[in-house]
Amino acid sequence: MQSEFEFIKRLRSRAGAAAGVIAGIGDDAAVLAPRAGWELLVTADLLVEDVHFRREYSPPRWLGHKSLAVSLSDIAGMGGRPRYALLSLAATRATGDAFWEEFFAGYFALAARSGVTLVGGDTSAAPDRVTIDSIVLGEVEAGLSVRRGGARPGDAVYITGELGRSAAGLRLLAGGARAREGVEDAEQRALRAHLRPEPRLEFGAEVGARGLARAMLDVSDGLAQDLGHICEESGVGAVIDFEALPVAAEARLPGEDAFGLALGGGEDYELLLAAGREAEGELKEIGRACGLPVARIGEIVARNGGSALRLRRAGEVLPLEPRGYDHFAARPID
Amino acid sequence: MQSEFEFIKRLRSRAGAAAGVIAGIGDDAAVLAPRAGWELLVTADLLVEDVHFRREYSPPRWLGHKSLAVSLSDIAGMGGRPRYALLSLAATRATGDAFWEEFFAGYFALAARSGVTLVGGDTSAAPDRVTIDSIVLGEVEAGLSVRRGGARPGDAVYITGELGRSAAGLRLLAGGARAREGVEDAEQRALRAHLRPEPRLEFGAEVGARGLARAMLDVSDGLAQDLGHICEESGVGAVIDFEALPVAAEARLPGEDAFGLALGGGEDYELLLAAGREAEGELKEIGRACGLPVARIGEIVARNGGSALRLRRAGEVLPLEPRGYDHFAARPID
């Protein structure tokens, strides 16, 4: 890797200028001009080598994409639009110039497509493993941020896209499958969902701008766990309809529980929201405009003791523990 | 270390509420209300174990303090006031609850004293080494941020405090000295300067608010290198007066070059600025109000080929390479 100063200089030339950026990379701090009448969203996400990613699994270009994507997804989950990014990189000697060249090709391609300008961050050597901290700042009109605590009994629960594809991709990677750019089959789609997720920026921003959701977040920990977050913050319960869950075809792997992957797999980066039934038409219309299916998968109910999350299946209603995938793998439901 | 969710829950209860914070820890992103007429400052600083700190050197409480201090210092260097912080922590198993309890005692003590609210971040496991990314957002009145590129020939160069104490502390640590709370001697003062630096928040904010500096930054890489940054960004040169440098008494270690430590040591977290001579009275007055000496250590000159930085000593003017301490250690000047 080049010296820190050379590296920063090169990033700076690529980051470019943008509206609202008074000073970007290259000073003690970035200077930004907030827009009057808008609130600011800020999120940070760590990607630690051998915890969140393995270099042997991930083409560096996709890792660059994912590093930004996970934080963009948080902004979408708040109903806002991403504007600025900072990136802190602790890099090992094992990752040379070619690695970072590719990493930034992926990072900047997604940034450009998302209207995001890199304005700062930090770089450091790291003894053993790469650590990435991806920081994104976004904007939302004052009062329109969509938090986790607004769900009310009677609201319907909606999800974009399909679930379980990313978790299936992780299983396939662990089994030896590797990403191949340009190849289009179920295996590669699953790998890509895990290694190169597509944040639902347009859907999230539009739902936010129209004030359609009472609670929203992006599914990073797994549907059950993330819906559990909404229930906890809103002081409500939720019932999920087994039959309504949009399980990705790619999650139906031999020997794997597709429903478990869909419910507990995590890293889907779809948007999960609670909204009044009257919003359904508009939500589906926004979905169509974004090329995204939107499924109603359950409803918000009053919390009255016992498990906040329940699963309705073939007429029966069963408690559901709001845990991540490991739990479901240990006790498959399907 | 507790589970991620328990840990976040506890941080959340400690972070508290504050003006401008619409949503803090516990959602996809923090929601902040920017003040009309103010610009936003954003900075991120990595602290990587065995690169920026060693756990054997650093009481965890001081590490928590320093993690915030280094980013606060960047905001001071821009002439702003810190308001919000995010903290991303990749923690190893070797750091248990007691470690983080102490870490956050130090972090939150400095945050409270600085008017800073923790609004977000991320936590993760780390296989081997702790990595900390400290993100701070600050405010500055529109148009008053002090960048690196505004120095002009004829400006004087000023520095707060004294130099070389932190570098001396690092030498002492490497030689086996260890921090002892409550002990007040030269060794402990040097160790504390390195392990628990005090950012010059009030001085920086006041200089910014009054528009006194044309260029400013905090001395993190070492005086020579950081003055080199101002010269490069401003397209100017600078001459430093050897006799005027405020070398800390603690930097006069046996067998060490105190002047080299002061000029190239780094991590002093003093503020270095270029300002018109007419500002000197006010700068010193602000310094007095903050209990900080302010020394005029040289002047900005036109850049006309050769080394941007020069050193004036006993009537002679010599070129000075704007490098970090290692360079000076290899070729002691004094």
Image (cartoon, coloured by chain):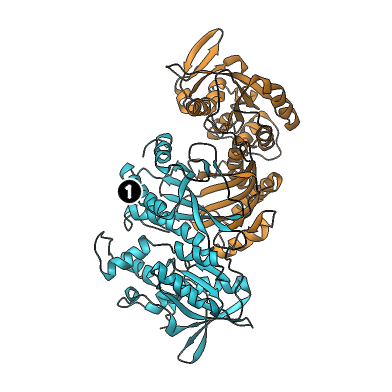
Chain colours: A orange, B cyan
Q: Is residue A40 visible?
A: yes
Quarter of the C terminus of chain B within the rendering:
bottom left
Residue B113 drawn above or below residue B223? above
Query: Callout 1: few (<14), some (14-19), or many (20+) C-alpha neighbours within 10 Å?
Result: some
The chain ID associated with circle 1 is B
Extreme residue toward the top, this view:
A315
Q: Which residue is mark 1?
A: B102
Residue B334 drawn above or below residue B248? below
Quarter of the N terminus of chain B within the rendering:
top left
Residue A110 x/y as whole percent: 67, 45
Residue placed most toward the observer, B96 or A41 = A41
Residue A22 x/y as whole percent: 65, 59
Residue B94 x/y as whole percent: 34, 45
Residue placed most toward the observer, B299 or B177 = B299
Residue occupying the point 43% across, 71% down = B287
Residue type beneath disc 1: Glu
Residue occupying the point 44% across, 64% down = B200
Question: Please, what secondary structure does the residue beneath circle 1 have?
Answer: helix
Extreme residue toward the bottom, this view:
B315
Q: Is residue A255 visible?
A: no
Extreme residue toward the right, this view:
A289
Residue A272 x/y as whole percent: 59, 28
